[in-house]
C-alpha cells in the first residue's frame, strides 16, 4: 500500500485545495467582469431573479474558493460549493433534456461537475490539512 508521509500529505492537500478552488475563483471573476454576458446566459437557462442570483453566485464562488485556498472553514465552503454545483448541474447542464446532437458536449460538462462535486465532498471529509489557517 502506498504511504505518504504527513508533510507530503499536507502539501498535496494544499495543492488540491488550490486546484479545485481555481475553477470557482476564475468563474466568479469572469462572471463579475462579464456581467451582461453572464446575465444573458442566466436568462437563456431560466435562472430566476438575476439581479440577486448573479451577484450571489459571484460572491459564493470567490469567497468560498478563497476560504478553501487558505484553509479557513474549508468543510463548510466545500459543502456550499458542492451544493451549488449540484443544483447548477441539474438545472443548467441537464444534458438528457437536450436534443440528441447537443447531449454529448453538455454531458461532458455535467460529468466534469460530478467529478468536482466529488473532490469538494472529499474536502468536506478530510478537511484542509495541516497547511491551513485552521484545521
Image (spheres, rainbow, N blue to C red):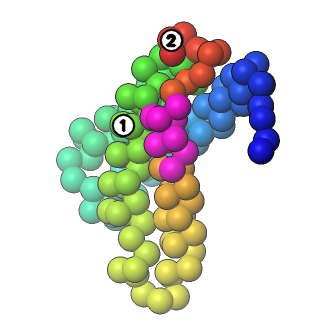
What residue does disc 2 label?
Answer: 134
Which residue sits at x=56%, y=79%? 104
Q: How far apart, in angstroms, are the residues tagged by discs 1 and 2?
A: 18 Å
Locate residue 71: give its quadrant: top right
Residue at the top extreme of this rendering:
133
Which residue sits at x=43%, y=29%? 75
Magenta region, mostly helix, strand or loop? Answer: helix
Q: Is residue 25 above or below residue 105?
A: above
Left or right position of 94 against 114? left
Residue at the front extreme of this rendering:
1
Q: Is 119 included in the stretch rendered in magenta?
A: yes
Number of residues whose C-alpha sits closer than 10 Å to that of mark 2, classed few (under 14), some (14–19) or many (20 or more): few
Looking at the rendered structure, the secondary structure element under dot 1 is helix
Q: Nearer the viewer, residue 37 or 46?
A: 46
Residue at the left extreme of this rendering:
49
Question: Is the residue under label 2 in contact with that under label 1 (CB below 8 Å)?
Answer: no
Residue at the bottom extreme of this rendering:
100
Q: Position of residue 108 (x, y in %)?
A: 57, 69
Q: Position of residue 38 (x, y in %)?
A: 42, 50
Left or right position of 87 against 70? left
Q: Is residue 33 above or below residue 44?
A: above
Which residue sits at x=47%, y=25%? 74
Which residue sits at x=52%, y=41%? 122
What residue does disc 1 label?
Answer: 80
Q: Nearer the viewer, residue 32 or 62?
A: 62
Q: Is 6 included in the stretch rendered in magenta?
A: no
Give the residues drawn in magenta, as a range.
118-126
Amino acid at each position: 500500500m502506498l504511504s505518504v508521509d504527513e508533510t507530503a500529505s499536507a502539501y498535496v492537500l494544499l495543492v488540491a485545495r488550490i486546484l479545485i478552488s481555481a475553477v470557482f475563483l476564475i468563474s466568479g471573476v469572469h462572471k463579475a467582469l462579464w456581467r451582461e454576458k453572464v446575465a444573458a446566459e442566466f436568462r437563456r437557462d431560466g435562472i430566476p431573479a438575476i439581479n440577486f442570483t448573479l451577484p450571489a453566485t459571484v460572491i459564493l464562488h470567490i469567497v468560498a474558493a478563497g476560504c478553501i485556498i487558505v484553509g479557513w472553514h474549508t468543510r463548510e465552503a466545500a459543502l456550499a460549493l458542492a451544493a451549488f454545483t449540484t443544483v447548477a448541474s441539474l438545472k443548467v447542464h441537464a444534458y438528457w433534456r437536450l436534443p440528441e446532437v447537443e447531449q454529448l458536449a453538455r454531458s461532458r460538462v455535467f460529468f466534469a461537475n460530478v467529478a468536482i462535486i466529488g473532490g469538494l465532498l472529499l474536502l468536506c471529509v478530510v478537511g484542509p490539512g495541516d497547511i491551513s489557517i485552521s484545521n
